[in-house]
Structures are given as structure tokens and as C-alpha cells.
Amino acid sequence: MTTTQPGQEMAIDAEAQIDEIESAGPTWFQVIWSSKKARFGVVLLALYVLVAIFAPLIAPYAADDLSFNPVELSSPAHPLGTTTQGADILSQLIWGTRVSLIVGVFGGLFATAVALLIGLVSGYLEGTWVDDVLSFFTNVALVVPTLPLIITLMAYSEVRSIWFTILIIGIISWAGPARGKRAQIITLRNRDFVTAAKFAGDKTFTIIFREILPQMMSLVAAGFFGAATGAIGAEAGLSFLGLGNTESVSWGTMLYQAQLQGALAQGLWLWLLLPGLVLSGLIMALTLINFGIDLISNPHLREDA
Amino acid sequence: MRYFARRLGYFLLTLWAAVTLNFLIPRLQPGDPAEMMVKKLAGKDAELDPAKIAAMRAMLGSPEGNLFDQYVAYLSQLLRGDFGVSYTYFPTPVTDVIAKALPWTLVLVGVTTLLSFVVGIVLGALAAWKRNSLFDSVVTLGSTFIGTLQAFWVALLLLFGFGYILGWFPTSGGYDSSTPGFNLEFLGDAIYHSVLPAAVLLLLTPIGWILGMRNTMIMNLGEDYIRLAKAKGVPDRQVALRYAARNALLPSVTGFAMALGGILGGQLLIEQTFDYPGLGRIMGQAAMSKDYPLLQALLLFTIVGTLLANLVADLLYGVLDPRARKANS
Amino acid sequence: MKRKWTFAACLALSGALALSACSGQIATRDNPGTAASGQVNSAGTDALIETLTLPAEVADNVAGIENYNPWSPSATSKNYFYEPLMIRSSMNCQVVPWLATEFLWEGPVKLSFTIRDGVKWSDGQSLTAQDVAFTLNLKKKYPALDDIGLWTNSFGAKAESVTAEGNKVIITFTGNAAAKFDSLITAKIVPEHVWGSVGDPAKYVDTKPVGTGPFTVGSYNGRKLVLDRREDYWQADKVKVKHLVIAGNFDATNAALKLTSGQLDAYWGEIPNPANSFQAKDPNLNHFWYAPAGSTVFTPNLTKVPWNDAAFRMAVSQGFDKQQMSQKATYGVMGVASQTGLKLPYAKALLPDAMANTDTVLKYDTAKANEQLDAAGYPVGSDGFRTTKDGKAMPVTFSVQAGWIDYQGAADIIVRNLKEMKLDAKLIASPPDAVDLQKKSGDFDAVLEYLNGGCEVARNLGAKLSTDQFPTKSEVRTNVGRYSDPATDQIVTQLSGSTDPAEQRTLVGQLVDIMVTQAPVTPLFYAPARMIYRTDKAVGWPSEADPYATNSEMLLIMTKLRSAK
């Protein structure tokens, strides 16, 4: 008969407990999928992504192909009609998906990355001069007037590519989330695991990015989705003011042209209605997914999926 | 005390930095205001008469000295309260131009922000309290959907639907034939013209409050002190109001203070779509036509407003939440 | 030698289509075209028109500031208080005497105006030559007021002195100033007894305008300006509008809506597709006339290879499908432009005899273009694109202003046409300010821009071909393409100093020759001066059948409008 040592018993017990914990908790994807709202969001987003990827196959014509009869209402060749310039509205809608998704992903990434870097460092080193300097920059960035800044930056670039737009959006939107991240990390840094890491002799950067960041992942993810929706909306607003990217036609550009060309007076309802709807749809998908992410970080909300 | 002093110091420093940036940014744009002005008056297809440009330059005056000298002059003017004369509305002083537009924005955006705040937190609290009911689902999903709509698009749709097609509301301006003043005709005219822009704002602004309040309250409702209150037998209604809601209100109140600060910026896209004579409209024009004095003054007001609101919000938080004060001193 | 130009020779008050022997004048002809619509005006009655509603005269007046100072960038009303010496219609180029009844050139350095009798300011005092002299001298004292360039050397020598003698105003110049005439007569005259004591006039906020014009301020509520007809106006019997309402600024859709519902009586901003958006709603009452004010031209950079070769330019100009461009850019409303750079048929009188009856529009013929390019020595390379004569690649980057939808439409076709001619062309859309920067620095391959079709050819076509009109670092001047030829400069100098119509015609003919044989710029389609109006209240608007003015001459139009009922 084998007798177990007291220590061994404890170890076996502990292992059993750990096994329980690891198998009891659902993975992040399961949490998101469990919520009906988030599930719908994932499906909707997948739809947009598919349209964007297969745009060359789905779209009947190129977005900047102006060779058709202008101001045509629905017809078999152009189910949604043509613009006053002679472009096919359906094609423009489909190709526009790429622009919005690219802006959303990369704009969101850029803004989140910068916000993380500055917010985390600033928050962890709260009370030191590093924080004072970084917070100062963040505050100034928050109050700098965005419209004149954008106009100034625009005037210097000869070609406004989509990456330029992403850069601009990143520049004007990192400050708010940075503040948020800073606040979050301030609450986290006094936890035990951080103290333990400090005693273990880890450097500041290691602590921030190896220890704390993983704990914040769901919050960071939620922040990313928020930034992405912000970027998509910002691109639409900029294009609507005529400050958008000049290389490709986005949904915002479609709205800009529709309004400028008196779409309503010429009977081109769809040109005005549809870009706004599909824009809302994409943002809705991302927001619903964000609901799911909220569930991960805030278990209290889980009961209502 | 240190807490408040630090905050004040920060405020002044940030103000200075923002004012400096505010001065620099428009001047970094290529092209000069005189040419811009003549171009605008001439229209798109027109030859630019060099005599007109020269006359406009003489009128607007060329700044003396290099950039640094201009900056120093600007600062000293500011300290004296002299905001200069607008280029577009030459020779009207900038303060007059802003004074004419300010009431419109204050009323429209101020009233709608206040209303939206009240409606938002009430709906949000109710939805949290009646979690998972039909009411909650409708409010949450509805708010989420409305939150995805772009403001300028909603404005366009309302304008076209109710203004052009149905003709129920006017399609531009803040008022029409009445004379401004405290008379019934003017007030009626102004209200009639603000219905559509206000509708857009009232539709979109409460969303943030609704969802924020709901989430915060749900989080609070899970806290121990709520359980304790319920266990003690405090009636549900009281638990909701005096415990949960009151605590959930905290982040919202500071958010509201910041929103008020943002009012001075006007709502550019909405005012532009409805041709509403508020600050946002004027700022858009000034930015596009390089009207430096007007633009700078407007931006200054916006910045000061935002910073003041931040300051007030921080101070409020310090007053309302003793934990914040302790943690920071 | 003295030339005397009398009232009789230069006058055409009733808009009659008389050919005049005056300098640089362009006579009208019958011209069917697509730039107008429907049947127009009856003769009207003598009754007074109760109110007429027009859009605001300046783009920005959101703030409701009241200032009638004619030099203010956002004057609440510019046209109806202070009047000019004479009015020259940009369409038929006839000079209509206004506050001055006649003018006299004694050589090109002395000009005198006879000031009309019996004109009263709105406060009852009489207009005198002293007021005119005062106004013109004010421009010397305060350069900010000199928007006509009287005291500078732009387009003609600067003035030396301005004096009043009896009822005449004598202006002496330091040199040949014949080119200054057109802008000089537009000077708005202000009363000495008011403006003499306001200090710096540029800073004067004029809220109670005392002018010679047909209206006085009725009421202004910050948004709507109501002007009342003056009984003691010097030609009050010709002004039939009792109340003129200057409403607000409207964008295209708003304007179309208000015009259709009768809330606006006329509009001159951009309304896309006016036939569809406005005229079709009521063809009897709704009219529009887009007069050709100039041409939209394709301007290559003449300092770069291959654009410095006239044969290359001529060949390429053959390959532009201008009809389609007009279709895309203007819904086909504006006609295809003549290669001469003159706005035809209005400027027909200026055509050299040899061209008088030919069609001066370069026909769209890709085959011919390719043939000529081959013949000019631009072989097609291995990649399918043409190379320079020594085999180097010559890509073309066409810059267009992003957001200017009509330009973008035309640019798209241009690039397509260039590709049809086997040129490696690319389209880049940049912000308008960036394109202006390119024009200033000369760092571009080709752009779209504007050639004015005004009455003084020296200032328009001439300037486009003059070496001293290259854009500078701080200003976009007319000669964007940088065409430079000493012989041409001579022609333009002679033309701008000439007051002899026969001489002028010869010189203009020489400039036209350059356009037609060298194509320094290629006119594509005409650019409009718009007039969109209703005829339910007032008739007598300028139209294709009666092209006596454009929206730049509102005073003239006010004296021609008559009541429709």
C-alpha cells in the first residue's frame, strides 16, 4: 500500500483544483459565441469581410469606371443605378467595403498601439516625471483642434492615399484611449502579482508588457474594436467634408458626391441611402462583437447573453 | 489641497501649449489669406486679378516680423483681450462675429445635451434595473443600432425627408423673416428652424449615456453592498435609487461636464448640413478660408471650454468621490 | 493723334445687336445651342413688380453682420448702392454709360469722363465730378481700396493724377494705360460728404449707405435684406422692382427647391443638371441660360518634353473627345470650345477673315492624332507606349483637383484619350490647394484650368501667352503653362496699348493664329456664367435670344426687368 506524504497530498489536491479551474472556464471565443448579440455581430462582420475579399469577383465593374450613362435609375445592367458621373453604384458599394475594413483594422490598430504604449507607460509610472510629461502630451493632444490640424496636414500631401488617411485618424484619436488605458493600469499595478514580479527583479517594461498587459487583454480588445469603429466613422466624416482619401471611392466619398450633385433633386435616392446603411451595418457588427468582449472582462454581464 | 493645486497648474500649462499649437497650425498651411479670400469671391472658374489680390493684402495687413515676433504679438494681444479683426467679415471684430453665433449654438447644443443627459441616464438606469426584460432588450439593441448611425447621414436624411420632400420644416438657416429679439414671432421662428437639427442631436446624443449608465449600474448591482442592502430589507426602489444609481451616476456626471465643455465647438457637421448659424458653421468657414483671427479665437474658446470642463470634472470627482482624493494626494 | 469716342458710337442701351466700331467689342449673333432652355420672355407690362427674391451676394454671411462698405469682403449687398462709372457687358462687350455719360481718350495717357447731370445721392445731395475724383484719389491714399489697380502698374501704366474740372474728371497716366479701361470703369463711386470724414475707409462699417443706386435699405433682420426702390433714382422709370429681397446662401438642392416653389426668383450658383432638376418641373416658367464666360482648357507644362513641341501638342489636341467631356462635366449644357480661345459665336467679329466661316473646333479623331504623332517622330516603344524622339519614356501625370466633380469627370476622359493615343498617362487627384502649389512651382505635367473670355483680349488670351504672366511663388498668374515667345510678347504689349479697333482685330488675329497652329493650351468646353430664373413675376432676364448681360452686371439687369403681368 502506498502512503502519500502530506505534502504530496496537497500537491495532488492543488493539481486537481487547477485542472478544475482550467476546464471550468470557457475560452474567449466560447464566451463571445454564447451571446446571441455577439454571435450575430460575428456573422455580420464575416459577411463584410467576405464581400471585401471577393470584391473583384462580385463587383460587376470597377469603382472608378466612369464610362456608363450617368443618372440612371435601376436597370438590369445597373441594379442600383449610376451616379451623376457615370459610375455603377453597386460596384462602388462593394469596393468601398475594402476601404472601410482597411481603415477600421489598421486605423484601430494604430490608434490602439499608440494609446497602449503611452497610456501603459504613463499609468504604471504614475507620479514620476515620465508620467507628468506623457500625460501633458496626452492632454494637449486631446484639446488640439482636429479640423484645422487635418486641413493643414492635408494641404501638404499631394496624394491622399488611404494610408495617409489612416495616419491622420490615428493622430487625432490616440489621446482619449491613452487616458483610459492609463486609468486602467493604475488600478492594476497595485495587485499582488505585480508586487511579486517587482520583487523578482523584473524591469519596468517587462512588468508592464509581460505581466500586466495579458491581464488587460480583454479590455485592450474592447478598446481596439472601439477604435476601429471610431476610425471607420472618422473616415466617413472626413470624406463627407471632402477631406478623405483621393485614391479610392469609400462610402463617405459616395455620400459626399451624392450631396454635392443634388442626388435628391435628380431622383437618386439610393445613392444617398445605401452608403449610410452599409456603414451603419459594419459598425453595428463591430459593436455587437464588443458586447461579447465585454462579457469576458465583466462576468457580471454574462447572465444576459 | 495639493490635489487641487496640481490640477490647476496642469490646466494652465496645457492651456499655454494648446494656445501655441493653435497659433502655429493654421500658419503652417500653404497659401495666404488674401489670395484665398479673392479666390473665394471670384468663384471657381475665374481669372485672379492681381490688383484685387494686392488690394486685399493691403486691407488685411501683412504680419510684421518673423513667426516668433508674430507669436509674441499674438500672446500680448490675447492677454489684453484683443482678439483682432476677422478677415472674412472685415472689419468686424472677431468677438462680435462670435457673439452673434454663440447664442444659437448655446441654445441648440446646450439644451439638447442637457435633455439627452437626463433622458439617457434615466433610460440606462431603468434598463439596468429591469435587466433582461423586453424593455431592456429594446433599449439596448435600439441604442446600439442608433449609435452606429453617422450624424451627418441622419442629418441629411431628416433634411431631405422632412424638409424637402414633406416640406414640414425649413431647410436652412436659424430663422427667416422675423426680427431677432425677445418677441414671440422670433422665438417661434427660431424654434421652428431648430426642430430638425435638435431632432438629430436628441436622437444620437443620449446613446452614450444610456449604454454607459446601464453598464455601470449593472456592475454596481453585482457589488456586495447592494447585496447587503437587500439583505437588510431595504425596499427595492430605494436600493435602485439611493445606492446603485447614485454610485453609477459618478462617471456619468464627469462625462457630462466634459460634454458641456465640448458645446463651444458647436456641432460642425450638423450645423453645416442645416446651414444653422452657430459656432460650428463659422468655424468650418474660417478653417477653409484661412481666416486666422476668427479661427484662433474660436479654437481658443473651444480649448478653454474643454480644459475648464476637464478641470471642473476632475474637481467634481475629487469632491464626490473621497477615494479619488485619497489616492491622489 | 486724337481719337474721339462719342456716346453715339459706343452706346447700345436697349441691348440691340448692333455691331459697334469700338475697341475690342464683340457682337452677338443668333446662335442655337444647348446652353439654354425653353421659350423666353414676353415684352412684359409697365406695372411695378412687388417683390423679387434673389440669393445673397456673398458666400459667407452666417453671422448676420450689417456692413455696406463696397470694399468689405462680405458686404451685405455689393451691387445696389454704389454705382460704377460705366458698365461693360461681358457678353456683348458694349459699354453702357452709367454715372459717366461719355469718355474720351486723348492719346493713351489721358482719359476724361463726363459725369452725368441730375444724379442724386440717396440723401438728396447731387453727384458731382468732385465725388468721382475723391473716390479715385481715395484709392491712392488707401491702397486697400485699389482693387482696380488704378495706382499700380498691373495691366497698363499707373495713374499720375486725378482731377475734377467742372463736370469732367481727368485722369492722367504715367504711360500707356489703354488696358486699364475695363477695370477702371467698374470703380464704385462713394460720396465725398460722407466718406471724407470716416478715417480709414477700409475699416469703416457702413450701416446707412448713401449711394446713387436704385435701392435703399428697407430692413435687415440679420438674414434677409429687403431693399426698397428709390423714387429719386436717376433712371427710376426703368426700375420696376418695388422691393428687392436678398435672401440667403443656398446649396444646389436648396436652391433648386426654392426656385421651383417660387421662394427664389433667380439663382446663379451651381445647380447640377438644370434641365432635369429645375426646368423640367415647369418648362413654361422655369428657365436657365449658362452663358459661356470662358473656356476650361487643358494646359500642359510647356517647359517639359514632349510638351514643348508644337507638333506634339497639336496632334494630341486632335485626340480629345470634348463632346464627352462636356457631357460628363456639364451634363452637356455647355458647348464644345473653339480652339481659337475666343468664345464663339459671341466673339465672331474678332476672328481673322480666313477663319470666319470655318468650324474652329478641333474634331475628335484618334486615328488622325496617332498618325500625326507618328509623323512628328514619337515612336511607340516595346511596352506599347510612345517614347520621345530619342527613345526615352515619357509618362504623363495629369493632376486634377479632388472634389471638383466636373473637372474630375473631364480628367477621367482626358486620361482615357491620352491612353488611346498610346501615351502612358496617369490621373492623380490632389486637394485644390496642392494643385495650386504645383501651378506656382511649375512642377506638373498637365492640369485643367480656365481661360477667360472677357472683352479685353489682351488681358485674357494675351495674358495666357505672356512671359510676364508666369505664376510666381506666391501667386497663380494666368500663364500657367509657361508659354514664352518674344514675338508674342510684342503682340500682346501692342494689343494692350491699342485703342484702334482695326489694329486690335489684326493683333487678336495673330494671337488666334498661335492658338490654332501651336495649341499652347487646348480649350475643351465653355465655362458658364449662370442665370437660372423664373418668369412668373419678371421678364426681361438675359437669355440666349437676348444675351445682354450676366450675373456680373446685376445693375444693368435691374433696369431691364419688367413685370410679367
Image (tube, rainbow, N blue to C red):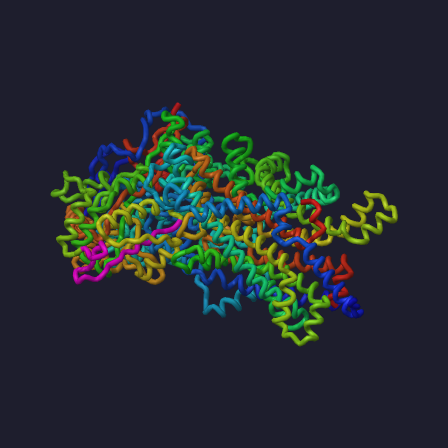
Q: Is residue C385 magenta?
A: yes
Residue range (magenta): C380-402
Task: Report the magenta stretch's main SS.
Answer: loop
Residue C277, percent across and down?
40, 33
Say if C391 sits above or below C84 in the image. Answer: below
Residue C381 in which image quadrant: bottom left
Q: Give whichever of A172, B66 is nearer the camera.
A: A172
Say if C28 sits above or below B24 in the image. Answer: above
Residue B150, percent across and down?
54, 45
Residue A117 makes an appearance in the image: yes
Residue B301 makes an appearance in the image: no
Residue B43, percent across and down?
38, 47
Q: How many marks?
A: 0
In the image, taking residue A290 as reference, residue A161 lies left or right, namely left
Residue B235 in which image quadrant: top right
Q: Residue at x 45, y 69 (%)?
A: B66
